[in-house]
């Protein structure tokens, strides 16, 4: 399976504007901030539009939301965002290898 964030990197598909005007990589990179509502309104709108239209990113958004919820329900560990990001990237990497 091709990792979803690499699909947008194919140059053969000229004229393809990513949903919301932001590509999958940009969305995934900012998912935490999006869920934590740490982004400015403009970016939030872009990501929201992207998630509504992109069937590749939406499951990851759902997954990440559930994942963050899981972390917070595990006794408010208060893991720093960098750590959470690392964990999530690890999961994505493992997914892409499978
Ligand atoms: Zn996407």
Image (cartoon, rainbow, N blue to C red):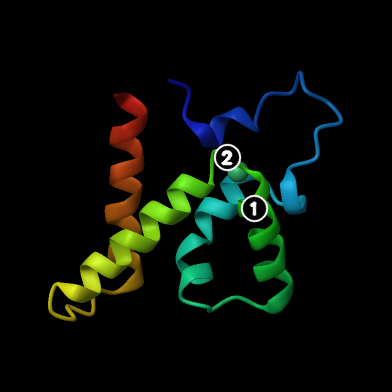
Horizontal side, residue 71 vs residue 10: left or right: left
Q: Which residue is mark 2?
A: 55
The image's mark for residue 31 is none
Above or below residue 10? Residue 79 is below
Q: CA distance from mark 2 to mark 1?
A: 8 Å
Above or below residue 31? Residue 4 is above
Q: Residue at x 51, y 52 (%)?
A: 28
Mark 2: which secondary structure? loop
**What is the tally of numbered marks visible in this picture?**
2
Above or below residue 11? Residue 80 is below
Q: CB atoms at circles 2 and 1 under 8 Å apart?
A: no
Label 2 CA crowd tier, 10 Å (few <14, some 14–19, many 20+): few
Above or below residue 51? Residue 72 is below
Which quadrant does the N terminus fall into?
Answer: top left
Mark 1: which secondary structure? helix
Q: Which residue is mark 1?
A: 52
Cβ of mark 1 under 8 Å from ligand 1: the answer is no
In percent of width and height, residue 80 lies at 29, 74
Q: Residue at x 61, y 53 (%)?
A: 51
The extreme left residue here reads 75
In percent of width and height, residue 82 lies at 34, 66
Ligand 1 image position (quadrant) = top right
Horizontal side, residue 26 vs residue 58: left or right: right
Quarter of the rendering containing residue 85? bottom left
Q: Nearer the viewer, residue 10 or 16?
A: 16
Quarter of the rendering containing residue 13? top right
The extreme right residue here reads 15
In percent of width and height, residue 12 lies at 76, 18
In percent of width and height, residue 8 lies at 65, 33
Cβ of mark 2 under 8 Å from ligand 1: the answer is yes
Q: Residue at x 34, y 37 (%)?
A: 93
């Amino acid at each position: 399976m091709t990792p979803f964030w690499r699909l947008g990197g194919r140059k053969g598909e000229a004229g393809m504007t990513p949903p919301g005007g932001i590509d999958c990589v940009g969305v995934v990179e900012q998912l935490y901030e999006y869920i934590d509502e740490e982004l400015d309104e403009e970016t939030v709108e872009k990501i929201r539009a992207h998630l509504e239209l992109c069937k590749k990113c939406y499951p990851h958004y759902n997954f990440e939301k559930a994942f963050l919820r899981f972390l917070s329900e595990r006794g408010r560990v208060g893991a720093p965002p960098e750590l959470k990001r690392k964990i999530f990237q690890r999961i994505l990497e493992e997914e892409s290898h499978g």
